[in-house]
Image (cartoon, grey):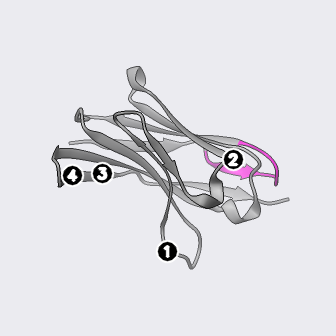
Amino acid sequence: QVQLAESGGGLVQPGGSLRLSCAASGSIFSLHVMVWYRQAPGKQRELVAALRSGGSTNYADSVKGRITISRDSAKNTVYLQMNSLKPEDTAVYYCKLENYVGINIKHDYWGQGTQVTVSS
């Protein structure tokens, strides 16, 4: 069983920065993807950034150039560095681990979410 715990959310002014952390405990498979999603009030959950076990990344167009996903494998922790934050970045941010047991077979695990509010 895997557990994910996000932290680092809070209130920040427009233009500010935050770093979110997602600490994983349990078994992380050699083939996996760590993903950050966010969900704003009244909107669908959307992918923000993904980091594959091989090191490749992808980002939502709305955050490219402002947000970076990275990991510390020794700590089993994935980070989301968010700079130049905008009010539209306000949302609950969730991390998800996709553990692949085969090419098209995976187990998904979600964290509880952390609130990010960008407001003056």
Label 1 to label 3, Cα distance in Å? 19 Å
Q: Position of residue 42 (x, y in %)?
A: 57, 79
Helix or strand or loop: what does disc 1 sit on? loop
Residue corresponding to mark 2? 66
Magenta highlight: main SS: loop
| Dot placed on the residue nearer the N-terminal end, 3 or 2 | 2
Of all residues, the one furthest to the top in this rendering is: 74
Label 4 to label 2, Cα distance in Å? 30 Å
Extent of the magenta region: 9-17
Q: Amino acid at mark 2?
A: Arg
Residue corresponding to mark 4? 107
| Dot placed on the residue nearer the N-terminal end, 1 or 3 | 1
Of residues 61 and 47, which is closer to you in this image?
61
Mark in front: 1 vs 3 = 1
Helix or strand or loop: what does disc 4 sit on? strand
Q: Amino acid at mark 3?
A: Tyr
Local crowd at mark 3 within 10 Å, few (<14), some, or many (≥20)?
some
The image's mark for residue 44 is 1
